[in-house]
Amino acid sequence: MDNEILLDVQHLTHFFPITKKIAVKAVDDLSFQLRRGEIFGLVGESGSGKSTVARCVMNLYRPQAGRILYKGIDTCDRRAFRKNRRMLQTTRQLIFQDSASSLNQRMRVCDIIAEPMRIQHITPPRGTHRAEAAFQMHYVGLDPSFLDRYPPELSGGQRQRVAIARALAMEPELLVADEPIASLDVSIQAQIVNLFKHLQQEHGFSFLFIAHDLAMVEFLCDRVGVMYHGRLLEVAPTEELFQHPLHPYTKSLLSAIPIPDPVRERARKLIPYEEEPGAPRGTLREVSPDHFVAE
Amino acid sequence: MGALLEVKNLSVRFDARAGEVQAVRGVSFSLAAGEVLAVVGESGCGKSVLCKAIMKLLPPTARITSGSILVNGADITAYRERDMRRLRGKLFSMVFQDPMTSLNPTMTIGAQIGEAVRLHHPRLSRGELRSRVEELMTLVGIDRPRERMDLYPCHFSGGMRQRAVMAIALAGEPSILFADEPTTALDVTIQSQILDLLREVQQKLGTATVFVTHDLGVVARVADRVAVMYAGKIVETGTAEEIFYDPRHPYTWGLLQSLPALSRGRDTLRAIPGMPPSLENPPRGDAFACRNPYALAIDYEEEPPMFRLSDTHYAATWLLDPRAPEVIPPIGGGLHG
């Protein structure tokens, strides 16, 4: 892994207006960097703004403030985006959480996987779109007999693989995965996580991996950022974060991971976290190499 | 302790367009009063169908083809809808996976809990009803119940909604609570709180609980006993300690090994290869054989019987047959202490 920064999120802020006066601060002055070839995990409870970050990074939302630099290009700047549209749209891909609603029910699996190539007018390197779809399916561990099936005929794990195959068809450099395994069985989660790990190691994909399952994050990610109420509270390499959590919220999150061992699990205590009202908004400060905590 | 609920050799079939689906195939288990039984298995293994079959909440396409369900010694297998209604809520009630779909979005939380209370105590005055609802909301850990009674489900977070659903389920003071993946839709922290709540309620009220989940990781906290289901059958059952420290069935090994907590420091997770079989025409022999790295030739021919390991621990795998080759379990044992 080199230290080239692929994605640089600077002071990202995104509000959702509810009325003219009230707005929900979904993401509030958030900055982090994703290096090429690394898996960066973004964890936090639901409503902490993780998905909003993903959608801002993918240009699905237009942030109110802040910059998102992808390979040095400001993707929020309309002119820069138009100039590099093709590159931005092919090298960044998104995998949604709910594959039941992110795949078109009326399209066959082979058409779903080949659709991005049709849209971008890419000549399939393996001859036909169908052959390309079959190749990608083989790659994610799906049987080619599924080529002519429709998404509702597949199980959750198989559908999620189709969604991954579709994202891979563009041979992206950055994959943004928004809770890709949350709706799957534990045994299938393990298969998908192994696939992600393989993609990173063999093909140098970079991931922005969004999850609330800390056990999987610990296994998969190189670095982790902990989000709470739209802000990053702690960013650190995975091992460092799980061994020496510094922020009280991180400690609370870690204390909630179930342990598959009855004696230890029954003794496990949940550390509650209450944000002090009116507490000053912390800024990230580096406490040890690569370990940042909001203070 | 006598068995509160006893299920003997229960089989459930669905009529599907393509043929008959055998969702539950000869399941037997018993539940003592005040006990927590976790039913663990992948989706489609029949664990939800099992709960719904006991409560008789199955759709009309499903049939109980064999077996019996005994509650306090009384056989309820042949009970009709009218008789079942008297049991539901009082004897057993259920908490479903998604709290948003089990709550009515147009009714306040208080009214929905009150509705359930009124069903069981029709003669309560308005004031008594209100105080009972408050009591239930406090029981499930909803702070400031007096204010929150008049809120709608959309004002509640996922964890709070699940608490409200639990309050409704507990309104009739049931002796058995079926919790069907109650934490799957929730965050880790909230999941932990709901699990603690389940345990707390069970200890306070002495409610026996059947806890259905796909994640073996979460059951260590709440379960007294664990039943592992695969393809419509219970393949291993034992106390939580026996299942976690001394698992014997290769499927239980697979489930435990796929947990990331037990793969720390490894490069890949040890996933169970393949997919669960279709239950339309289940394979001959052991349904797990084709995904099982320890499968013996006989697994493809004949179904293994339940081998007894202790009074509480049973497993259905040919590996326990005295003629089988010795296999060292890849997991367990070392975890203890």
Image (spheres, coloured by chain):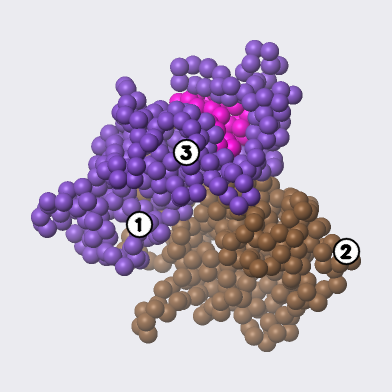
Against B241, is A89 above or below?
below
Q: CA distance from mark 3 to mark 1?
A: 33 Å
Helix, strand or loop at label 2? It is loop
Q: Which hue is chain A drawn in?
A: brown
Mark 3 Cα-neighbour bin, 10 Å: few <14, some 14–19, many ≥20: some
Q: Give the x, y percent position of residue B34.
A: 31, 31
Q: CA distance from mark 2 to mark 3?
A: 51 Å
- Residue drawn 65% across and 60% down? A151
Report the amino acid beneath label 3.
Ile
Viewer-side residue, A272 vs B44: B44
Instruction: Classify the position of the N terminus of chain B by image quarter.
Output: top left
Q: Amino acid at mark 2?
A: Arg
Image height of B278 relative to A223, above or below = above
Residue labelled with disc 1: B161
Which label number is shown at residue A126? 2
The chain to which mark 1 is attached is: B
Classify residue B280 as left or right of residue B138: right
Q: Which residue is mark 3?
A: B64
User: Are the numbered discs 3 and 1 placed on the same chain, yes or no?
Assistant: yes
Q: Which chain is purple?
A: B
Magenta span of residues: B228-256
Q: Does residue B152 show up?
A: yes
Element carrying mark 1: helix
Instruction: Identify residue type, mark 1.
Output: Arg
